[in-house]
Image (cartoon, grey):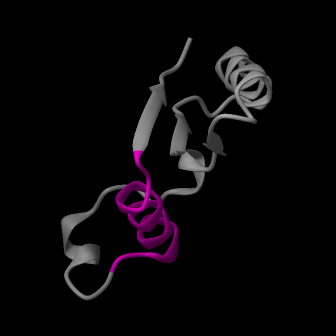
Amino acid sequence: MKILAIIGSASQESSNEKLMKIIQKEFSEAYDIEIYNTLPSFPLFTPDKLKNDLPAALSDFKTKITTSDAIIINKQE
């Protein structure tokens, strides 16, 4: 099973990311857990900028979500 673990914190010392890394390690034999920690690289939401095409970071994120069997959202502390 492919699981996408989304880290909602922009902190480089995020306890949420540390927790997800522990979970990833503990369940690595049973699940393919990918930690997605690049939300801070997303452009600010501006509808006019989305008329032509999605920025690469958002397109990549959309692909990861649609190809995952499950999603864990780990929000800020």
Tell whether position 47 is magenta: no
Residue range highlighted in magenta:
54-69
Tell whether position 62 is magenta: yes
Quarter of the picture holding the C terminus? top right
User: In this rendering, is residue 4 above or below 16?
Assistant: below
Task: Pick whichever, 64 or 76, lies toward us.
Answer: 64
User: In this rendering, is residue 21 above or below 43?
Assistant: above
Please provide percent x and percent y for residue 48: 20, 74
User: In this rendering, is residue 16 above or below 11?
Assistant: above
66 sits to left or right of 7: left
Residue 30: name its quadrant: top right
58 sits to left or right of 3: left
Task: Pick whichever, 17 or 13, lies toward us.
Answer: 17
Residue 37: name its quadrant: top right
Q: Residue at x 74, y 35 (%)?
A: 28
Q: Residue at x 52, y 38 (%)?
A: 6
Task: Pick whichever, 71 or 2, lies toward us.
Answer: 2
Judged from this view, the residue extending furthest toward the top is: 77
Q: Residue at x 58, y 29 (%)?
A: 9
